Structures are given as structure tokens and as C-alpha cells.
């Protein structure tokens, strides 16, 4: 799209009001790149509305002048969908009110700029749980996790963000406001419009607030790190854990030994979680509404798993500090890769029953394609989501390795597709995978998504660089 005219820029500044915009390159610069430092965008103007009404005024001006918009939350996305390339940048960070928490409805309404951690804390203050949790929760915002349909570590028990949203408020591409902040579990009156906006990556409107599901606070929690000989044993252990606890498994995180080595090498304050050095680790967390029940259940589970030969070692966290230490080595898996050099990153999902097969086949294929490549796989076994990262050989030619990223990733993604999986389990498509997704999405899927978008945003002003 053509750059905004001077008249459009002036109208946008007026709509945003004093303190609601900046064109200072120094102020804008931190929001033009992302954590992996792969995308470096540019924009003539960053808009920071403080209310839904201000957001609507801004979007109306953009619609009138055909000015493209890139919405942005906490800038924690990993596929570049929040980085503008000439579009105006609309940040929702100042939409930061917790509007209400209603324990009797097990619901709360928060604005888009509230961080995930702040939402968790607001729920906890009313003796409720908002269960979505991920490593960037101190920075990631509700608007962002809604727009990317974020997952995290508790999907096994509570579902992805799509499962946790009761209602939405959003500004549509023509500047009208969709008032959908309902607290209903049942509303069977036509298309569920909020579900179109969830996971749409800002292409159908700007999410300004969400009504979220809350849950009872669990009265007991038990956490363990276990060692295993194979990923197949981890899948068997998960099935046993779900069956023996009646759905009490809240987290089940798989890690390969090489990823643990990276964490111990590069992340201060970490230590070996087990006495042995197994090829695979699982971080398992059980919860219960009954005091002390999770602890007893975990001990029974691990004892039976030892007897069955599923696990080779285990350590149960005896206090909050030990639990935090176990979680730290899991949450720092990505950060610990950075000092090792660049890598081909894959956020994929396959059926849980086929995780072990996928890992074996993909690793063999990658090693044939690029001998010496190091595979660091970790992720959420309970929902089939693996972060399958391929790093260059230690001391190898990094630039030559990165030059093969696209070809190497296609090898991995083709295997994922054969297993009826997804090339983006929780990060979205963004700028990184939009073109590649055409290889794996059917003609009908793509045409239907394009038709929906054309109907809601006929001038394609909302995040035009992503989603077909």
C-alpha cells in the first residue's frame, strides 16, 4: 500500500489526541523488532490509544484514507506478525484496565493491554485461576494472546486461548465497535463472531477487551522432573498419568538432553535436576481440588512408572523453590539456544500418539540433509505441540547453515503434514509462515479465509502482510 499522506497522518494524530501518538524514531525503535531479531520494521507513526473510543476513531481515519494498520500488543510474537513495514503501528499497551472480576460467573473482563501476568494476578486476588501460562507472560498482553490464539503449558487441562474466551470487544476495519463482552457459556444464536477474531492475527479488527473464563484455585499441586530413555516412553507415561489421575495432569513438558545442556551452560542459577543424565526429561505437574491429593497421586504414579520401566529417574519438588527451579530449566529452553548460534525454528503439532515417530523421522531426515546439525526438541506433549529447533553444528559455518533454513524447514514441515499435523501449533503464521502455509492448506481453506477477510476488510487495511 502507498505510504500515508500528510493529511492522513495529521488526521490520525488528531484522532489519537495528545499523548496518544509519536513519530519520534527513538521512541518507536524498540517496537520495530522482535525477540529473535529477525524482522526490523519501519513506520511513520505509532499510535497508542487509551480507550476503545480512541481506537475506533483511529481506525475510522485509517479506513477513510486507506491507511494500513499493524496492531501490536506486548511485541512477544515469534513470527513477525506484529512488526510494521510501512503501516502505521497501533499499540494497545495503554488499554490496561481490569474492568471487572465476577467470581459467581467465573469470569473477568480485561482490556487488551493488560499483561497475561496481570490477568492471572487479578483472578488470584478473587480466589480464582486464569490458567493460560507461558514464558513471556510478564510482557505478553491479552490482546496479543487472543489475536494469536496462544497456547502455553496448561493446554492439556484448560485448552488454548480460544477455549478461554467468553466474549470480545473489538474495533472492526471500518471503525465500528463489536460489543461482544458476554459472560455466557451458552449462546446458540448464529455465527460465533468472537471466534473469527481469535487467532486472526489482527487481520479482522483490533481486539480492545476480552471476557475470560476463570476456574477454581487448586488446593494441592505436585511437581516432578523425571528421566526417560525415549520420547515413546513419555507418551506412554502421559497416558498412564491421565488415566490414574482422572484428568489431574496440568502440565507435561518434554525436553531433550541437548536442550538441558544448553540451559545449564548458558543460564545462570540453573543446575542438573536429576542425579542421572537421561536422554529425555519430562516435567510433570498434577493438581487437585483436594488438599494433599496431588502429592499422593504423583507418588503413586511415579512408583508405578518405575515398576513398568517407563522412567529411569525422578525428583519430586519439595517446596516452591524446587518447583521454580524445575520450571526454569523448561522455560529457558529457547533463550539457552541463542548463544549457540542461529537455528531453524519449528512450532509444530502432530497427534500425541505419533510424537515419537515424528521426532525419530524428522531427526533422521535433518541429519541426512545437514550432517552435524543439532536437534533440540522440547514442548507440550499433552497437546502434541513440539518446538523442534535445529541448530548448526558446534563451530560450523553459521551463515551457510542459515542459508539452508527454508529448504530444511520444508523437510520438517513435509513430515509434519504426512502425520496430519500443523506447521504452526501456537505461534501463528505471521510474516514467517504465511507464504509457506499455501503449501499445506487446501484450496478450499485458503479461498474461504480470503472470502471472510474480503467481506470484513474489503480494502485490506488490517495487518496486510499476514494471512494470505
Image (cartoon, rainbow, N blue to C red):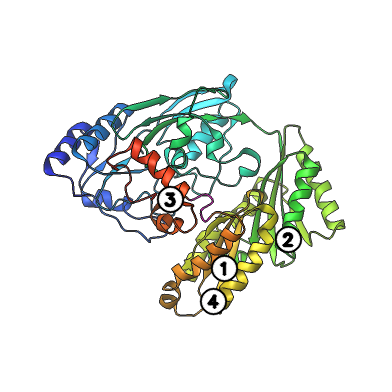
Mark 2 lies on a secondary structure that is helix
Residue farthest toward the right in the current orientation of the protein? 307
Q: Is residue 64 above or below residue 352?
A: above
Left/right of residue 22 with respect to residue 164 in the rendered view? left
Left/right of residue 298 with respect to residue 86 in the rendered view? right
Q: Residue at x 21, y 32 (%)?
A: 15
Relative image position of residue 223 (x, y in whole percent): 70, 47
Front-lying residue, 370 or 99: 370
Q: Main secondary structure of the magenta part?
A: loop
Mark 4 or 3, nearer chain start? 3
Is the residue under label 2 in contact with that under label 4 (CB below 8 Å)? no
Q: Is residue 250 magenta?
A: no
Callout 4: 10 Å neighbours few (<14), some, many (20+)? some
Left/right of residue 157 with respect to residue 137 in the rendered view? right
Span of residues in magenta: 423-427
Q: Nearer the viewer, mark 1 or mark 2?
A: 2
From the image, tell me which residue sits under label 3: 77
The Cα atoms of the two marked residues, 3 and 1, are separated by 26 Å
From the image, tell me which residue sits under label 2: 232
The Cα atoms of the two marked residues, 1 and 4, are separated by 27 Å
The Cα atoms of the two marked residues, 4 and 2, are separated by 24 Å
Is the residue under label 3 in contact with that under label 4 (CB below 8 Å)? no
From the image, tell me which residue sits under label 4: 369
Give residue 265's mark.
1
Relative image position of residue 88 (x, y in whole percent): 25, 45
Amino acid at each position: 500500500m502507498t505510504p500515508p499522506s500528510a493529511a492522513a497522518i495529521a488526521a490520525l494524530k488528531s484522532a489519537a489526541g495528545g499523548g496518544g501518538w509519536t513519530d519520534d524514531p527513538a521512541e518507536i525503535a524498540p517496537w520495530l523488532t522482535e525477540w529473535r531479531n529477525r524482522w526490523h520494521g519501519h513506520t511513520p507513526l505509532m499510535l497508542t490509544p487509551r480507550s476503545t473510543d480512541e481506537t475506533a476513531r483511529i481506525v475510522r481515519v485509517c479506513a477513510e484514507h486507506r491507511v494500513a494498520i499493524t496492531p501490536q500488543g506486548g511485541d512477544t510474537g515469534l513470527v513477525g506478525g506484529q512488526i510494521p513495514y510501512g503501516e502505521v503501528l497501533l499499540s494497545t499497551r495503554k488499554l490496561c484496565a481490569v474492568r471487572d472480576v465476577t467470581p459467581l460467573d467465573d469470569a473477568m473482563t480485561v482490556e487488551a493491554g493488560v499483561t497475561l501476568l496481570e490477568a492471572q494476578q487479578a483472578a488470584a486476588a478473587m480466589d480464582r485461576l486464569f490458567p493460560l501460562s507461558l514464558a513471556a507472560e510478564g510482557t505478553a498482553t491479552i490482546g496479543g494472546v487472543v489475536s494469536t490464539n496462544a497456547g502455553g503449558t496448561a493446554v492439556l487441562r484448560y485448552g488454548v486461548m480460544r477455549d478461554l474466551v467468553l466474549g470480545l470487544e473489538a474495533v472492526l476495519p471500518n471503525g465500528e465497535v463489536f460489543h461482544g463482552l458476554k459472560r455466557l457459556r451458552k449462546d446458540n444464536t448464529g455465527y460465533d463472531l468472537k471466534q473469527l477474531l481469535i487467532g486472526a492475527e489482527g487481520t479482522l479488527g483490533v481486539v480492545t477487551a476480552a471476557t475470560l473464563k476463570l476456574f477454581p484455585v487448586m488446593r494441592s499441586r505436585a511437581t516432578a522432573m523425571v528421566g526417560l530413555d525415549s520420547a515413546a516412553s513419555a507418551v506412554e507415561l502421559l497416558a498412564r498419568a491421565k488415566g490414574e489421575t482422572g484428568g489431574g495432569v496440568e502440565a507435561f513438558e518434554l525436553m531433550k538432553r541437548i536442550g538441558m545442556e544448553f540451559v545449564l551452560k548458558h543460564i545462570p542459577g540453573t543446575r542438573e535436576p536429576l542425579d542421572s543424565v537421561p536422554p529425555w526429561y519430562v516435567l510433570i505437574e498434577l493438581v487437585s481440588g483436594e488438599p494433599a491429593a496431588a502429592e499422593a497421586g504423583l507418588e503413586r504414579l511415579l512408583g508405578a512408572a518405575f515398576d513398568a520401566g517407563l522412567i529411569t529417574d525422578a525428583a519430586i519438588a519439595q517446596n516452591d523453590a524446587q518447583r521454580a527451579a524445575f520450571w526454569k530449566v523448561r522455560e529457558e529452553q529457547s533463550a539457552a539456544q541463542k548463544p549457540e548460534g542461529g537455528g531453524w525454528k519449528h512450532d509444530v503439532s502432530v497427534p500425541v500418539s505419533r510424537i515419537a515417530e515424528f521426532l525419530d523421522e524428522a531427526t533422521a531426515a535433518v541429519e541426512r540433509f545437514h550432517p552435524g546439525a543439532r536437534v533440540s526438541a522440547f514442548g507440550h506433549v499433552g497437546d502434541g505441540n513440539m518446538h523442534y529447533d535445529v541448530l548448526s553444528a558446534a563451530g560450523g559455518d553459521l551463515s551457510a547453515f542459515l542459508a539452508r533454513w527454508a529448504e530444511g524447514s520444508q523437510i520438517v514441515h513435509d513430515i509434519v503434514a504426512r502425520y496430519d499435523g500443523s506447521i504452526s501449533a501456537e505461534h501463528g503464521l505471521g510474516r514467517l509462515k504465511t507464504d509457506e502455509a499455501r503449501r499445506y492448506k487446501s484450496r478450499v481453506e485458503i479461498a474461504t479465509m480470503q472470502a471472510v477477510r474480503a467481506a470484513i476488510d474489503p480494502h485490506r487495511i488490517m495487518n496486510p502482510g499476514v494471512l494470505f
